[in-house]
Image (spheres, rainbow, N blue to C red):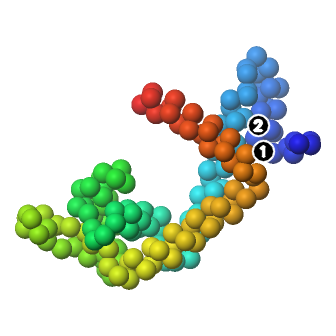
Amino acid sequence: MGVKKSDPVDAIAAQWRRERPDLDLEAMAIIGRLGRLLVVAQREIEAVFTAHGLQRGEFDVLAALRRSGEPFELNPSVLADTLMLSRAGMTGRLDRLEAAGLVRRTADAEDRRAIRVVLTEIGRELVDRVVTDHTENETRMLSVLTAEDRDALDRIARILLESMEQRE
């Protein structure tokens, strides 16, 4: 592979090694790099949504409706649960999306007391454009890795995530 390039995480680890040589800093360095990676990746991901006039949360709502398949509608509570949002948080997002003409609220055909959130045609066209750009952006971000590296990273991330989620 060659010589490792030093980064800010190395500087932090070096300071800790100087002050606390008794500590094993391997995990701190790995988690630190993962944290920095998340921050940098989120900026690049957010830029795609912003270019389309959306916030991340608004994209998430449109994407959940689009993924649900025809007729691209869901109950607001199901949407909130899917996106791990409070009902109030979902209402705010739906208000903005409805004002933009990307979704509409309609009465549930089976229970007139309930409502459904429906992806409009304009909303479907927008989310299709955004998800295309989003997946291309993520592919570009990972393009520095070989196919084997991407497989290994995915495998390792799954192992760590499963282990940590079991602790919740």
Q: Where is residue 76 in the image (x, y as percent from the top left)?
A: 24, 61
Q: Which of 15 and 54 is in front in this view?
A: 54
The reply, left or right, for residue 149 in relation to residue 89 is right
Q: To which quarter of the image does residue 74 belong?
A: bottom left
Q: Name the residue beneath numbered marker 2.
A: 12
Q: Single out the residue that lies furthest toward the top.
A: 22
Disc 1 crowd rating (10 Å Cα; few below 14, some 14-19, many 20+) is few
Q: Which residue is drawn at 70% across and 36% down?
A: 30
Q: Position of residue 101 (x, y in %)?
A: 33, 82
Instruction: Name the kind of residue labelled 1 in the image.
Output: Pro
* Quarter in which the C terminus is drawn: top left
Q: Which residue is drawn at 73% across and 28% down?
A: 26
Disc 2 crowd rating (10 Å Cα; few below 14, some 14-19, many 20+) is some
Disc on res. 112: none
Q: Name the residue beneath numbered marker 1.
A: 8
In the structure shown, which secondary structural element does the residue marked by tag 2 occupy?
helix
Q: In this orientation, does residue 54 appear?
A: yes
- For the residues labelled 1 and 2, say whether their Cβ atoms are less than 8 Å apart: yes
The reply, left or right, for residue 78 in relation to residue 138 is left
Q: Residue at x 21, y 67 (%)?
A: 116
Question: Eyeballing the image, is 161 above or below 55?
Answer: above
Q: Which of 77 and 120 is in front in this view?
A: 120
Q: Position of residue 8 (x, y in %)?
A: 78, 44
